[in-house]
Image (spheres, rainbow, N blue to C red):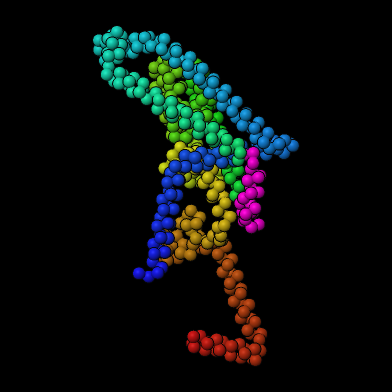
Amino acid sequence: MPRWLPRAMVLALVLLACFQLATWAFHQLVSLLLNVLIAFFLALAVEPAVDWLAARRMRRGLATGIVFFGVLIAAIGFFTLLGSLLAGQVTMIVQDFPDYLDSLVRWSNSTFHTHFSRVQVQQNLLASQWLRRYLQNSANNVLAISATVLGSLFDLLTIALFSFYFAADGPRMRRALCSVLPPARQAEVLRAWEIAVTKTGGYLYSRGLMALISGVAHYVLLQVLGVPYAPALGLWVGLVSQFIPTIGTYLAGALPILLAFTVNPWYALWVFGFVVVYQQFENYILQPRITARTVAIHPAVAFGSVVAGTALMGVVGALIAIPATATAQAFLGAYVRRYAITDEARTHGSRGRGGRGGSLLDRLRNGLGEEAPEAPLEGRRSEARARGEDERRTDEQERRGPEDQGQEGQEQRDDDQDEGNW
């Protein structure tokens, strides 16, 4: 056995063990890494407000605390208002449930010529096996639901803590990172950081604008239908649908549909149809255009980045896909070398404009022996300049003496000989 083979086998086993350990650690810490990533983008979003307060001679930690306290107060007020609204409406629905059931039974009997009664429907509903199984499964899953809620609260606290540290110690983090890099790399890191702050702020601005448009649109519909608490419901739909990815749309539309059902069951159907239609309008028309203007990326790139982010990291990927893509695109765009555009027809979006071959009709006319149309003015000017250059060279050759022409002929013969040897 060669002397190097045992050492190579040991080295290979050590590398394999390190790879397995790193893989295991990554899978164990993936939730923490995602929380840190969310916290980083949240810190980038609030950093402009923190910088504005810090520029007024306020300590950066205090400025960060004020910004986060304002966000916390706004969130608590919003959810408290909606919680009280939801609790009151659920109580009203439970109290008026017999009346809703009577109206539904009357509509079914008059439309389909059935002979149902409210008491019969209630007895069948209470005696159904499906309802019993659902209640039993819900009772058994109380512990799992409680654990999920506690885990979500812990994740929120983790995100809030890391985002506070990132925003408060942003300059210190940048100094620590730049201290291990050469000056050229330091400039690149700082520029990338500034681009990330700008793009993240633009993304939040676009989300806020779409939340405003969505809230106003749903408020108008609910106000026309006479649904109570229309302003609060419009605010709920706008914020939840824009800042909770993937499931935010369904959570935002469920509450207005439920409250519209308390007024008239047909109104609930109208609200449901409006939510579906508006969501398609937002996804394919409104969101790509606003995102392209605020984040400065192509609508197709924005849509594709959201799809890819959702496939890779789920809800977190959908939330940070657009600002991350915009940051990477703006940073890498500075290193892409660009050239002058050739004057071809396809670069202008028209097959008949520019190009060496001309349009298909011109090539057919030339093939059939027809006279091509007159060249454009710029082409005629280029030809005139070329003819003038040829005439000028001819005049210079005529003015030259025999010795100059002989020397020029000798140089031409030498060039031809060199070319033949090559």
Rendered view: 123 above or below 241: above
> Per the image, is 235 magenta?
no
From the viewer's perspective, is 173 left or right of 17? Answer: right
Q: Position of residue 203 (x, y in %)?
A: 55, 39
44 and 411: which one is in front?
Answer: 44
Magenta stretch: dominant secondary structure: helix
Number of residue marks: 0
Quarter occupied by residue 41: top right
Quarter occupied by residue 106: top left
9 and 279: which one is in front?
Answer: 9
165 and 281: which one is in front?
Answer: 165
91 and 416: which one is in front?
Answer: 91
- Residue beneath the point at 48% across and 53% down: 349
Magenta residues, start to end: 167-189
- Residue beneath the point at 45% across and 22% down: 255
- For the N terminus, the quadrant is bottom left
